[in-house]
Image (cartoon, helix red, strand yellow):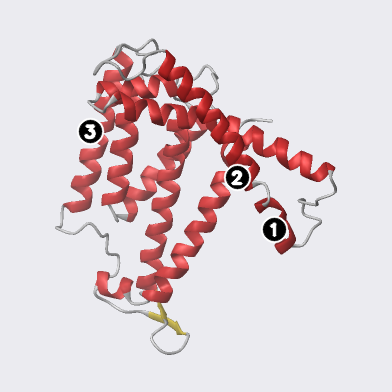
Amino acid sequence: MAKLFSYEEKGTWMEDLCGVTKLIFFLAWTITCMLTYDTRVLAIMLATSLILFKLSKTSWEQVGSVFKVILVFMIINILAIFIFAPGQGTKIYGTEHILYSLGGRWVVTQEQLFYELNVVLKYFTIVPAVFMFIITTNPSELAASLNKLGVSYNIGYAMAIALRYIPDVQDDFHKIKNAQEARGIEMSGKAKLMDRIKNVSAIIFPLIFTSMDRIDTVSNAMELRGYGKNKKRTWYMGRKLAKADYAVMIVTLVVMVIALVVTYHDGSRFYNPFI
């Protein structure tokens, strides 16, 4: 079974890129997606993101459970937008085309649906980029990349350790879950939803204690090796920028500039098809 958010060498060209390059791409991609509400830009970015995700050879087993959680969060967010700001679309686009009324101030309009469509596009554009960045980047190389960009190596190393131990925590979860099921505690789809939630929640405390033991082991090992003594350090996994890295960074920044120019050419970051 593939491990959640676990780095695996798959021989793709993305893995050959320096961590700095992938980090710059991820930041530029995310910032552009956050700034723009131009549906045309978001649609192109979504298509590009899905193509790159396919080329990265990321397996569904590695991200499936996280994607389901994000999908649930997205649905909750969309519903919350309509409940608390049902007229946001009308306010943004300056027109109102009513489809039907649910009573009171909750009126479904084309403008509101279009606005929430853009929010959905944002989710599906950013999420594949996040998955690609984590899955195709060696955690140790990520720490070195962050340090090259001026981030404290303590912060970079903390992020690297967190990513490195996500698969281990996942393994511990499955071991505890299997042990509980061997004792007759049902956690599969056969049990009722509330019973499953109650039984799975019983895993939290053993998982916390196991993780704390691992943290203690790692911190002791780092202390014995004199970690943090110096303000700077060298990196075994650090890479030098190659031609491909410069090419990817240039293309990324050019695309970012073009996307933002298209977005703000009329003074607004919202594409308005209603005028």
**Residue under the point 26% across and 19% down:** 246
Q: What residue type is labelled 2?
A: Ser
**The residue under label 3 is which amino acid type?**
Val
Mark sitting earlier along the chain (3/1): 1
Q: Quadrant of the C terminus?
A: bottom left
Q: Which of disc 3 and disc 2 is earlier in sequence?
A: 2
Question: Residue 192: percent from the left, percent from the top?
Answer: 77, 62
Residue 65, which numbered label?
A: 2
Number of residues whose C-alpha sits closer than 10 Å to that of mark 2, classed few (under 14), some (14–19) or many (20 or more): few
Q: Which of 231 and 54 is in front in this view?
A: 231
Q: Mark 3 points at which residue?
A: 254
Which quarter of the rendering shows the N terminus?
A: top right
Question: Quick check: marks 3 and 1 in contact, CB under 8 Å?
Answer: no
Q: Distance between the residues labelled 1 and 2?
A: 19 Å
Indicate whether 258 appears above or below 195. Answer: above
Closer mark to the observer between disc 2 and disc 3: 2
Residue 94, horizontal then vertical, whole percent: 24, 74
**Dot 3: few (<14), some (14–19), or many (≥20) neighbours within 10 Å?**
few
Q: Return the disc, 1 or 2, that comes first in the chain's sequence.
A: 2
Q: What element carries label 1?
A: helix
Q: Which mark is residue 198?
A: 1
